[in-house]
Amino acid sequence: MGSVVDIIGDTVTQVRFDYAVTIVTERSMLRIQTDFEFADQEGTRTIDPESSRPFATRILGALYRPVESCTYAEGGSIAVVLAGGLTITVNPSPDFEAWNFSISGDRPRLLVSMIGGGVAVWDETKPS
């Protein structure tokens, strides 16, 4: 896909629902603000975060699962694979910032899927 985000092994500790769906690990937070693909043992569904209630139980299946991979493409998509084959994929939106992803730790960053595609990156790496 593209660039790897270094959260492999982190565990999902929270799943939040409002006008978005937010996935939180020990060091990161992915806020999904547009339709996304959710794949698990029951199949793949496209889910609108603002209407995610019918899929809440399936999405809550992400809780306590470790991250196996997390990658984003310069075109604006992101994919997170959790243990057990659960996958969340968000593509860019022509109208909205589809997702934003904040990472804490030794190399804090904020990644934002830009309107129409692309990824803006703010890197808070401190100079040595």
Image: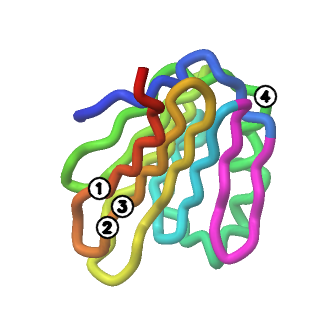
Nearer the observer: mark 1 or 4; the answer is 1
Distance from label 4 to label 3 (Cα)?
A: 26 Å
Q: Position of residue 36 (x, y in %)?
A: 47, 60
To which residue does mark 2 refer? 114
Q: Earlier in the sequence, mark 4 or mark 2?
A: 4
The magenta-colored residue range is 14-26
Q: Nearer the viewer, residue 113 or 1?
A: 113
Nearer the observer: mark 4 or 2; the answer is 2
| Disc 2 to disc 3: CB gap under 8 Å | yes
| Disc 4 to disc 3: CB gap under 8 Å | no
- Looking at the rendered structure, the kind of residue marked 3 is Ser
Distance from label 4 to label 2 (Cα)?
A: 29 Å
- Relative placement, left or right, of 104 versus 99 is right
- Relative placement, left or right, of 124 versus 21 is left
| Disc 3 to disc 1: CB gap under 8 Å | yes
Q: Position of residue 63 (x, y in %)?
A: 77, 36
Is label 3 in a helix, a strand or a loop? strand
To which residue does mark 4 refer? 64
Mark 2 residue crowding within 10 angstroms, few (<14) / some (14–19) / many (20+): many
